[in-house]
Amino acid sequence: MRQQLAFYASTPSCRTLLDRHGWADVGTELGEMAVRVRWAEMGTRISDEMLAAFAVEGETLAEAAQAINERYTGLLDRVAFYLPFIPGERDAEWAAALAILHATP
């Protein structure tokens, strides 16, 4: 997730969000790293605080779904889990997560 956030944060269009949080210098640094094709290092510039601000985490899909509800109910009308989906694998976990998300008014 840090790598993905670093990629987005390196783009000028996403910098305003970093600016709002006081991390403009990180965005500038990531942009410079992207120009220099230093992709592998970029994720190390995403702090724990930044990760917590931009990502929702959970030990299970159900925990992640609950965290999404707590953080975003009333603000979002759709979410996406950023992880591989392989049909037939983790079906019970997906079902539990979807039940939590759909139960939210």
Image (cartoon, rainbow, N blue to C red):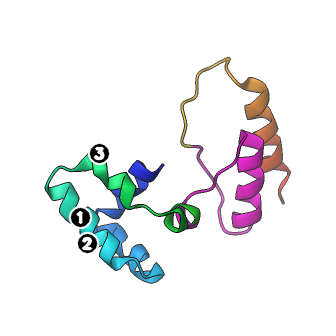
Identify the amino acid type marked 1.
Gly
As drawn, 61 above or below 46: above
Residue toward you, 73 or 57: 57
| Range of residues picked out in magenta | 53-81
* Mark 1 vs mark 2, CA separation in Å: 5 Å
Q: Which residue is mark 1?
A: 31
Residue 19: quadrant of the picture: bottom left
Left/right placement of residue 33 relative to residue 4 reads left
Dot 1 and dot 2 residues touching (CB under 8 Å): yes
Residue 40 image label: 3
What residue is shown at x 14% (from left), y 55% (from top)?
A: 36
Residue toward you, 79 or 55: 55
Dot 3 and dot 1 residues touching (CB under 8 Å): no
Q: Position of residue 26 (x, y in %)?
A: 33, 71
As drawn, 12 above or below 58: below
Q: Earlier in the sequence, mark 3 or mark 2?
A: 2
- Under tag 1, what secondary structure? helix
Identify the amino acid type marked 3.
Ala
As drawn, 42 above or below 18: above
From this viewpoint, which residue is outermost toward the top? 88
* Mark 3 vs mark 2, CA separation in Å: 17 Å
Residue toward you, 87 or 6: 6
Q: Which residue is mark 2?
A: 28
* Mark 3 vs mark 1, CA separation in Å: 13 Å
What residue is shown at x 59% (from left), y 43% (from top)?
A: 81
Residue 104: within the magenta? no
Q: Position of residue 50 (x, y in %)?
A: 50, 66
| Pointer 3 local density, CA inside 10 Å: few below 14, some 14–19, many at least 20 | few
Q: Position of residue 16 (x, y in %)?
A: 37, 77
What residue is shown at x 84% (from left), y 60% (from top)?
A: 105
Q: Earlier in the sequence, mark 3 or mark 1?
A: 1
